[in-house]
Image (cartoon, helix red, strand yellow):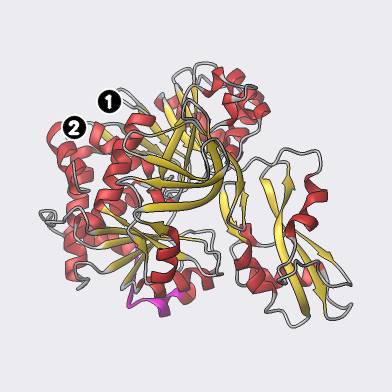
Amino acid sequence: VRTIPDPLLRAEAIHNPKTAFVCDGRERTFGEFVDRCRRVGKILDDLEIGHGERVGLLAANSDTYAELYAGVPSSGRVIVPLNSRWAEPELAYALEDAGAKILISDQDPGGLISSVDRVLSFEDYEVRLSTSEPLEFADVKEDDLAGLFYTGGTTGRSKGVMLSHRNLIANTLHSQITMPLDDDDTYLIVAPMFHAAGSNSVLQCIALGICQVVVPAFEPNRCLDLVEKHRCSATLAVPTMVAALIEAQAATPRDTSSLRLIAHGASPIATEVLRRANEEFPGAELLHLYGATETAPLVTGLRHEEDLIGTSRGKSVGHPSLGVSLRIDASTGEAGEVLVNGPNVMQGYWNKPEQTAEALEDGWYRTGDIGYLDDEGYLYLVDRAKDMIISGGENVYCSEVEEVIYQHPKVLEATVFGIPHEQWGEQVHAVVVPRDDSLTDTDLIDFCRTSLGGYKVPRSVEFQSKELPKSGPGKVLKRELRAPFWEGKDRSIN
């Protein structure tokens, strides 16, 4: 298994009549799914989208999303999954930066029409697919670019993470080692598929002949109903989703005895949430995954977390997956920046050679996370080198928010950082020195909404009349401003 067509061909040969996907009451077999993936290439040929060109995808979770995620790179093009929570200017930037020729979307594209040569709605896509012939998959190579996954940037602009066929297939194999599934499993997709972690299961399950039940939008009661109805056995969710599933199950118990594995990642999870998950879903193994878009995404996993609740080992993010190497940029036993090496590490950032050079050091990816390894090789994360907030599993780069705030004519100085939030872990907080007293928090928040996705918009604004505290070189002392909010609270970062 070397390129994305390989698991598709395997599924077609071995698992053809089995159900591959269930979504909105619709079922598709592996044979039907792979046939549709083959037709994707014909559609793009007819639309004169050349090999190597970028195809934007803006849509909710669905089996159609999965076939485009697999079918576009299998046809020799490059898939560009877009975050549906972004504001239109953010989406437009990603499409234009990628040089996308076409946007395939299940929603009104609005002004994004001007960012691409063509927009193809899901309705038109279905019409074209029904009349297209299935083609042989392209003769793609391991190092061919498969996808551009846009992630936030410390410079205020999102970056296109270049993931090759090798990267995504390596991650598929790593996932099977760290999160082992078998052909008797039924996998529930609840995390957004536009994230590398959300679509993480697609190729793994296809290769193994595992049915995937897709939830278009997360709603805890609906998810639990699907677990009961389809006997789902495994899923991956962010901690806020896990907490919501716990509350829904406690309020209205379902038969979730089939659920044997609950993986979580992207943001910290409270010890109490783990305890309650173990109570409400007693048959499920809890698995903590750590990774990054730049690593396609899996790096480490902590298995059977339910046995480690409240212990020091339980605060780790586990061991690296087989094939992934870790290095700490510090003396042995000390904390330093975590570096990752392996076949899953990205090729670089699209059209950003300087940022690529900063992130990659002789093939090692600098994660921006500070951590250490214990004597048994478990990784512990203690801080972030990057100026970043994690809110509800979404990364928010402070510089992106600050850049927008500074565009307001009544702002003299501003800084942004994360403060505690009971549900989301962290919320975006802005400290602003206004030019006059007429600026209100509502004015500033509404201003930010026009340029930023909702999860990046400050939920609270603090006004100061004096200059923000700074270091000798003139850098704002965020730690000094942030400290009172976190006093007595555990600010884990993994």
- Give the residue at mark 1: 183
Residue 473 counted in the magenta span: no
Above or below residue 120? Residue 253 is above
Kindly identify which numbered label has been placed on residue 372.
none
Q: Residue at x 30, y 64 (%)?
A: 124
Instruction: Name the amino acid, label 2.
Output: His
- N-terminal of the pair, mark 2 or mark 1, is 2
- Give the residue at mark 2: 15
Instruction: Name the amino acid, label 1.
Output: Asp
Percent from the top left, x then y, of residue 470? 77, 67
Q: Are marks 2 and 1 in contact (CB under 8 Å)?
A: yes
Report the front residue among 295 and 59: 295
Disc 1 crowd rating (10 Å Cα; few below 14, some 14-19, many 20+) is few
Horizontally, is 204 left or right of 152 in the view?
left
Residue 120 counted in the magenta span: yes
Above or below residue 492? Residue 360 is below
- Total of numbered circles in the picture? 2
For the C terminus, the quadrant is top right
Report the front residue among 155 and 203: 155
Horizontally, is 92 left or right of 50 in the view?
right
Q: Residue at x 65, y 28 (%)?
A: 271
Q: What secondary structure is marked by label 1? A: loop
Horizontally, is 437 left or right of 20 in the view?
right
Q: Residue at x 67, y 62 (%)?
A: 457
